[in-house]
Image (tube, rainbow, N blue to C red):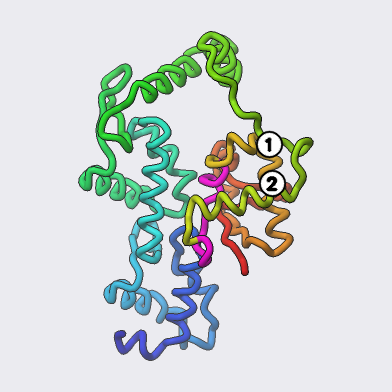
C-alpha cells in the first residue's frame, strides 16, 4: 500500500465498499458521496488517492468525458454480458453497440469498444458471415448455426413487415403457425401462481446466473429479466415482484441515477417502481 493510501485508510475502505456494491463504474463525484468528510482533508485529495489505487492494481479506471473507476471483477462481468448478448443471436457491430448502451450502463463507449476488441483478440467473440449485405456479424460462437440464421431471417422479416403495419408479435405468431413448432411451456402469470412462487423463482435464478450473488455480487436486472422471459413474460409482473422483494429487505435494488437521459427503449430494459425511479441491478441481502 502506498503512503497516500496508508494515510487515508478509511477513505480507501469506503471507496472499495462503494465499488463492490455498484453494478457499474463510478465517477469521482459518486465515490465522494460514499466517503465521509472526516476521511479526507479535502475533496481534492480523492482523485489522487484513486489514481494511487489504480497504480497499485486495486481498481481500474478509464477517462472519457470524466474518469470512472471499477473493481477488476466488474470488467469480467461486463465481458460476460457482451457474450450473453451475442449468444442469443449474432449482431453487427452497430447493433451490438446499441444493445450495450442498456446492458453496460455507466461504461464509456470507448471502453465498451475496447472490451469488444479484446474479446475478439482473445477468440471469445468471432466474426461470422452475414445473412445479407456486407456487414460482418459478431457471435459468441466461431461459426453461425442454422438457428442463428433462422433468427436473423425472422428479425429481417419483422423489420421489413413493420412498414406493412405488422407488429413483431404478429409476425412471430404467423411464423409459429406456419412452422408449427412444439407447444411452448406456458408463462407464469399472477392468476396461476402466487407472489411467493414469483419471488422464489427470481431469487433462485439470481443464484443460477451468478453464484457469487450469495456473497453480495450484483445481478443485472436486464440479464435477469432475459433469463426469466419464458417464465415471467409480463414486464409489470416482473417489476412489481422485484420491488416487493426490495420492500421486504430480501434484495437491494440499485437505482439508475441518470434515467432522465435515457431513451424509452433503454428505460424499458430497466425495472420501474411506477414512481419515476428506475433500477439496473439487485443484490441479495442477508
Q: Nearer the viewer, residue 208 or 43?
A: 208
**Distance between the Cα atoms at labels 2 and 1?**
8 Å
Q: How many tags in the picture?
A: 2
Q: Residue 215 placed where, x, y %?
A: 51, 67
Q: Residue 189 placed where, x, y %?
A: 72, 36
* Res. 156 image quadrant: top left
Q: Residue 128 placed where, x, y %?
A: 26, 28
- The answer to whether residue 164 shows anywhere in this view is yes
Q: Is residue 152 above or below residue 140?
A: above
Q: Residue furthest front?
A: 182
In which quadrant will I find the C terminus?
A: bottom right
Ranked by sequence position, the earlier of labels 2 and 1 is 1
The residue labelled by disc 1 is 188
Left or right: 80 in relation to 198 = left
- The answer to whether residue 276 shows anywhere in this view is no
Residue 198, numbered label = 2
Left or right: 40 in relation to 240 = left
Magenta stretch, residue numbers: 213-225
Q: Residue 259 placed where, x, y %?
A: 58, 50
Q: Is residue 144 above or below residue 2?
A: above
Is disc 2 in contact with disc 1, using a CB cutoff of under 8 Å? yes
Is the residue marked by circle 1 packed among few (<14), some (14-19), or many (20+) residues within 10 Å? some
Q: Nearer the viewer, residue 200 or 234?
A: 200
Residue plotted at (48% across, 18% down)? 159
Residue plotted at (37% across, 25% down)? 148
Residue plotted at (40% across, 55% down)? 77
What secondary structure is found at the residue carrying circle 2? Answer: helix
Q: Residue furthest left?
A: 121
In which quadrant will I find the N terminus?
A: bottom left
Amino acid at each position: 500500500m502506498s503512503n497516500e493510501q496508508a494515510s487515508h485508510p478509511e477513505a480507501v475502505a469506503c471507496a472499495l465498499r462503494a465499488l463492490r456494491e455498484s453494478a457499474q463504474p463510478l465517477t469521482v463525484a459518486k465515490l465522494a458521496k460514499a466517503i465521509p468528510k472526516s476521511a479526507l482533508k479535502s475533496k481534492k485529495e480523492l482523485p489522487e488517492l484513486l489514481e494511487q489505487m489504480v497504480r497499485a492494481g486495486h481498481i481500474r479506471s478509464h477517462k472519457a468525458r470524466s474518469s470512472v473507476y471499477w473493481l477488476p471483477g466488474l470488467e469480467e462481468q461486463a465481458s460476460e454480458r457482451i457474450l450473453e448478448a451475442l449468444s442469443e443471436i449474432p449482431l453487427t457491430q452497430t447493433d451490438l453497440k446499441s444493445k450495450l448502451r442498456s446492458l453496460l450502463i455507466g461504461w464509456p463507449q470507448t471502453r465498451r469498444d475496447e472490451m469488444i476488441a479484446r474479446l475478439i483478440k482473445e477468440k471469445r467473440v468471432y466474426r461470422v458471415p452475414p445473412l445479407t449485405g456486407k456487414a460482418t456479424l459478431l457471435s459468441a460462437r466461431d461459426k453461425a448455426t442454422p438457428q442463428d440464421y433462422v433468427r436473423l431471417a425472422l428479425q429481417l422479416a419483422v423489420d421489413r413487415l413493420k412498414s406493412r403495419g405488422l407488429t413483431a408479435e404478429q409476425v412471430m405468431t404467423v411464423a409459429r403457425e406456419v412452422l408449427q413448432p412444439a407447444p411452448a411451456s406456458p408463462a407464469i402469470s399472477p392468476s396461476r401462481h402466487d407472489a411467493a412462487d414469483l419471488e422464489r423463482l427470481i431469487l433462485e435464478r439470481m443464484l443460477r446466473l451468478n453464484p457469487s450473488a450469495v456473497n453480495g455480487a450484483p445481478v443485472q436486472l436486464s440479464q435477469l429479466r432475459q433469463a426469466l422471459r419464458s417464465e415471467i413474460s409480463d414486464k409489470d409482473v416482473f417489476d412489481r415482484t422485484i420491488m416487493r422483494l426490495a420492500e421486504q429487505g430480501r434484495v437491494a435494488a440499485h437505482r439508475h441515477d441518470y434515467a432522465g437521459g435515457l431513451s424509452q427503449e433503454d428505460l424499458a430494459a430497466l425495472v420501474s417502481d411506477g414512481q419515476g425511479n428506475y433500477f439496473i441491478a439487485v443484490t441479495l441481502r442477508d
